[in-house]
Image (cartoon, rainbow, N blue to C red):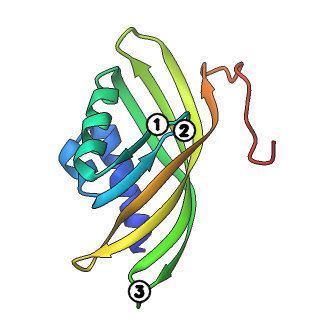
Amino acid sequence: MAINDLTHRYADAVVHRDAEQWASTWAPDAVWELGKGRRVEGRDAILELWNSAMDGFKAVVQNVVNSTATLDEEAGTGSGRSYIMENWTRTDDSRGILLAYYDDLYTRVDEQWLFASRELVIQYGGPPDLSAPFQNAWA
């Protein structure tokens, strides 16, 4: 339940562009990997990149479609995967969707589960009519 809450707080913060709530889902020394060599370390740097990226959008709706998680309560660590679907409108009025998943590592800080690491794996990013190429997990 704690990890479901974490992923849903993250997605809710994206939808409402709530930087404070979004940042609160990350551990202070977290790592965010977005592919194509884009790796950011530390909550402050992660938030800076997120704010910069969000400046390009009028609206984003992120849904957590399904997820799995395994936790080691004693160690305060865990791992999991969360599938997401986003619908977005950019500031130039272009529209698209993102189908992807995050490979996650979790850590417990002050009795709260947070993201220690999130690696985004994009399966589709493009026009809403799904006309762009797909990248399947097994391809």
Q: Which residue is drawn at 39% across and 48% down?
A: 11
What's the amino acid at mark 1? Arg
Residue at the spot of label 2:
35
Secondary structure beneath label 2: loop
Residue at the spot of label 1:
38
Left or right: residue 5 versus residue 38 is left
Q: Find the distance from the CA under tag 3 to the CA under tag 1.
A: 29 Å
70 over 122 or under it: above or below:
below
Residue furthest to the left: 20
On the image, the x and y values in percent for residue 4 come to 44, 66
Q: Find the distance from the CA under tag 2 to the CA under tag 1.
A: 5 Å
What's the amino acid at mark 3? Ala
Question: What is the crowding at mark 2: few (fewer than 14 residues within 10 Å), some, or many (at least 20)?
Answer: few
Residue furthest to the bottom: 74
Give the label on residue 75, or none. Answer: 3
Give the label on residue 111, or none. Answer: none
Give the quarter of the figure containing the C terminus: top right
